[in-house]
Amino acid sequence: MRTRLLPLLIVLLAAVLLALGIPLAGSVAAAQQQRVVVDRIDDTARFAALAQFVTDAPGGSRRTSTDERRESLRSELESYYGVYGIRAGVFYRNGSAMANAPDHWLVPQTGEVRRAFDEALLSRRSHDPRQVWPWQRSRLVVASPVIRDGDVVAVVVTDSPTGQLRSRILRGWLFIGAGEIAAMLLAVGAALRLTGWVLRPVRILDATTHDIATGRLKSRVAVGGGPPELRRLARSFNEMADNVEAVLEQQRAFVADASHQLRNPLAALLLRIELLALELPEGNEEIASVRTEGKRLAQVLDDLLDLALAEHAEADLQLTDIGALAEERVAAWAPAAQAKGARLTGDCPPTTAWADPIALSSALDAVIDNAVKFTPAGGTVEVAVRLDGDSTTVVVTDTGPGLTDEELARVGDRFWRSGRHQNVKGSGLGLSISRALLAAGGGSIDYAHHEPRGLRVTVRVPRHGETGGETAGAGGAR
């Protein structure tokens, strides 16, 4: 969820910062240009004031003398151009120069300078130039009229390069960009903290749900940080888990009590059946059938007690040599397989993992017993211990009839037995007990087809303890 929520927050924050930064960048550029334009307006006003004192007007004949005031104006314009590199001139209405710097610069017939000149002839200052951007190599033109006796007698025009202006605008933008990046980094950090604060209770709830689903019914959510809604959800979840655990505990207690209470009457009934058999002819089929069903019922009661204990008992996890334990169970079941005409083999290298040795032994007994039971004479049952990432697996394969896809989906359910194997001895609780024993220690059991035929059962136990700090170990082949 964090990988989806965090990019959304970052995109929204970036959009907000851009929405603020773009107008701010435009304002900085406009302010810098306005500052330059105001300076140029002041300069043109000063030159216009000097030009008012130049009394001679343009004529058709060549001028023979130079007025001291015109020389003074020309000197000012040349100094202005030399210091700032800004072209400036005072031009009569017909476009001829009163004074200009550089000398060759005149009012062109077209272009921005001409438009500003014509606008000033109308007795008003030219409009502000268009906004200059850092990527444009343009110039700023400002024109002001020279008014004498209410008439426009000349126009002062300045044509400024924009290199320094564009540099100042770019520096302002870089400053804004640095601020935006810093703000974005702070926003991302805040978003990380916010999403962590919001989603931490969700992660804890998810982990606790997984623990309960895998049999750790004592797991609960610590009601701590996070939004109030998630804290209320955590409390509600804990209440639900308490109720579920109480119901399951009642169910287990009922099964255990019922099994225990039925064992004494059943034992007495079986004793009376044996006494009755003494009074009947030997080999009576009815009494043999009753005796068989009574023993089967006793086995079911014993299995129910075992299942109730398996679901209720806490796992005693220890660092266990899975290879040695599996080899021991193979040796224990080898005579049973040999008596049936099957072959039981084991490939069990020393491999350590965290498991309850008693629970794992019981689970392996049930799985190997099931494999030997359904493997015909001449078949093979193989037990192999392997490392699989963070787990150690014990894989039991057989060459029996196997199961269909529908049967694989149900194998391990309580009291379930394949319709093809109803005549085989058993209560249908052995694999359910195995699953409960393994789940208590964080293990699992899976079923799959074994090619070309048979069943493949994989018992998996974790190689690390619950703290995850110590590696259970890895063994090599003998």
Image: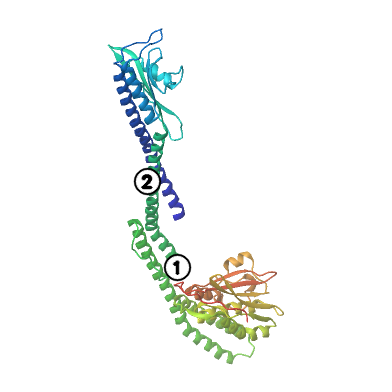
Q: Does the image show residue 302?
A: no
The colouring scheme, among rainbow, by chain, secondary structure or one colour, is rainbow
Question: How far across and down, in percent of the image, does residue 419 sit?
Answer: 62, 70
On screen, residue 321 versus residue 316, left or right, reads right
Res. 328 image quadrant:
bottom right
Disc 1 is placed on an element classified as: helix
Question: Viewed as shown, does residue 221 lie left or right of 289?
Answer: left
Amino acid, disc 1: Asp
Position in image of residue 206 (x %, y %) = 43, 62
For residue 150, the mark is none
Q: Is residue 102 above or below residue 297?
A: above
As measured in the structure, the alpha-carbon distance from the residue carrying label 2 to the one carrying label 1 is 47 Å
The residue that appears at 59% across and 77% down in the rendered structure is: 367
The residue that disc 2 covers is 179
Q: Position of residue 265 (x, y in %)?
A: 47, 84
Q: Which residue is label 1 attached to?
A: 211
Residue 191 vs 428, above or below: the answer is above
From this view, report whether residue 422 is shown above or below residue 130. below
Q: Position of residue 393 (x, y in %)?
A: 57, 74
For this orientation, the residue located farthest to the right is 378
* Disc 2 element: helix
Residue 344 visible somewhere in the drawing = yes
Q: Is residue 39 left or right of residue 407?
A: left
Q: Quadrant of the N terminus?
A: bottom left
- Residue 116 occupies which quadrant of the picture? top left
- The structure residue drawn at horizontal position 50% and vertical position 84%, both measured from the top left corner, is 266
Amino acid type, mark 2: Gly
The residue located at (41%, 7%) in the rendering is: 61
